[in-house]
């Protein structure tokens, strides 16, 4: 019976036979096949399952090493002491398998779905705020909600009374917001005459109020613009 261990631990064959040393199999950075490495024995009676065993070991360990870094638990020193059996087996030990992750992967994994929604919401809020910013001399505007603007006035029970309140608070000229669109509302005979008649030419190309175009034009009615 050939004692393969006598070759595997032979100090004449290996530089450091009792240590884990991948350098044993490297020459000038290239893989070096060593005759003395014979865990499957040699000759005609060598292991019949060698190719299968090598393929399995390769797949098993590369799959594990791609996903985890193996390291000893804190305050533990690993050694090469073994238990005797048909083969030499390591003694029981504990090992930590730490998942490998790149910085990007780490960030992605640590961002939860809720955080993503919060980020998205804050981003939309800031975007909406920037979009609705008005020049300094723009007529005053009552409090407007993000995204929808002053929709609260549109659905007021008594729109006329609501507008009267706004006139009292802001004066005859104020602005409102519907979605991201701004409107300047002009009230009172004096100002309306000023805008529509005295300076009428300047305001001829004023845009239509969206409700007119959306509702009246759709139903085949004449729009406000046609009337003015
Ligand atoms: C890491 C895994 C393995 C190692 C280290 C190993 C090692 C060995 C060794 C040292 C021998 C003795 C050769 C001799 O008598 O000189 C042997 C024989 C044998 N092994 Fe394996 N083996 C492994 C896996 C396998 C697998 C997976 C199979 C089958 C699927 C297998 C099938 C055989 C057979 C059939 C023999 C007897 C060959 C004969 O006497 O002609 N081995 N193996």
Image (spheres, grey):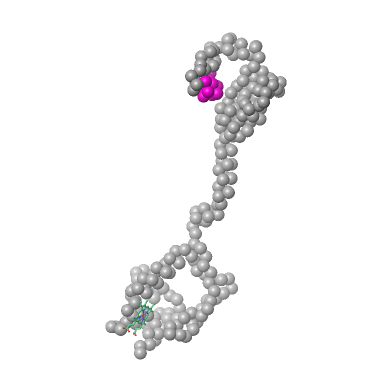
Residue 44 percent location from the top left of the image? 28, 83
| Residue farthest left in this picture | 44
Residue 89 percent location from the top left of the image? 46, 81
Residue 44, compared with residue 167, is above or below; it is below
| Residue farthest bottom in this picture | 1
Residue 58, can we see it?
yes
Asked if residue 208 lies in the magenta stretch, the reply is yes
- In the rendered image, the quadrant that contains the C terminus is top right
Residue drawn at (39%, 80%) of the image: 14
Q: Quadrant of ligand 1?
A: bottom left
Residue 5 percent location from the top left of the image? 40, 85
Residue 225 percent location from the top left of the image? 52, 16
Residue 205, can we see it?
no
Please identify the dominant SS of the magenta region. helix
186 horizontally vs 17: left or right: right
- Work out whether residue 211 or residue 66 is closer to the camera in this orientation and state it: 211
Region rendered in magenta: 206-216
- In the rendered image, the quadrant that contains the N terminus is bottom left
| Residue farthest top in this picture | 198
Residue 135, compared with residue 77, is above or below; it is above
Residue drawn at (55%, 54%) of the image: 110
Residue drawn at (35%, 88%) of the image: 2
Residue drawn at (49%, 59%) of the image: 101
Asked if residue 2 lies in the magenta stretch, the reply is no
Residue 180, compared with residue 193, is above or below; it is below
| Residue farthest front in this picture | 219
- Work out whether residue 73 or residue 188 is closer to the camera in this orientation and state it: 188
212 horizontally vs 3: left or right: right
């Amino acid at each position: 019976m050939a004692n393969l261990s006598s070759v595997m631990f032979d100090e004449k064959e290996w530089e450091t036979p009792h240590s884990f040393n991948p350098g044993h199999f490297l020459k000038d950075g290239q893989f070096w096949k060593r005759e003395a490495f014979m865990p499957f024995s040699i000759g005609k009676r060598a292991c019949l399952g060698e190719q299968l065993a090598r393929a399995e070991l390769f797949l098993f360990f590369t799959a594990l090493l791609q996903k985890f870094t193996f390291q000893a638990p804190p305050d533990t020193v690993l050694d090469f002491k073994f238990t005797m059996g048909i083969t030499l087996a390591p003694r029981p030990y504990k090992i930590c398998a730490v998942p490998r992750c790149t910085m990007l992967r780490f960030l992605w994994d640590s961002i939860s779905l809720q955080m993503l929604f919060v980020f998205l919401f804050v981003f939309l809020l800031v975007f909406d705020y920037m979009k609705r910013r008005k020049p300094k001399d723009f007529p005053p505007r009552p409090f407007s909600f993000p995204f929808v603007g002053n929709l609260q006035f549109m659905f007021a029970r008594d729109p006329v009374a609501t507008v009267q309140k706004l006139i009292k608070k802001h004066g005859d000229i104020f602005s409102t917001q519907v979605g991201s669109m701004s409107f300047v509302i002009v009230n009172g005979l004096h100002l309306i005459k000023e805008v529509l008649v005295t300076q009428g030419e300047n305001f001829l190309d004023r845009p239509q109020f969206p409700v007119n175009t959306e509702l009246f034009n759709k139903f085949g009615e004449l729009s406000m613009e046609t009337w003015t």
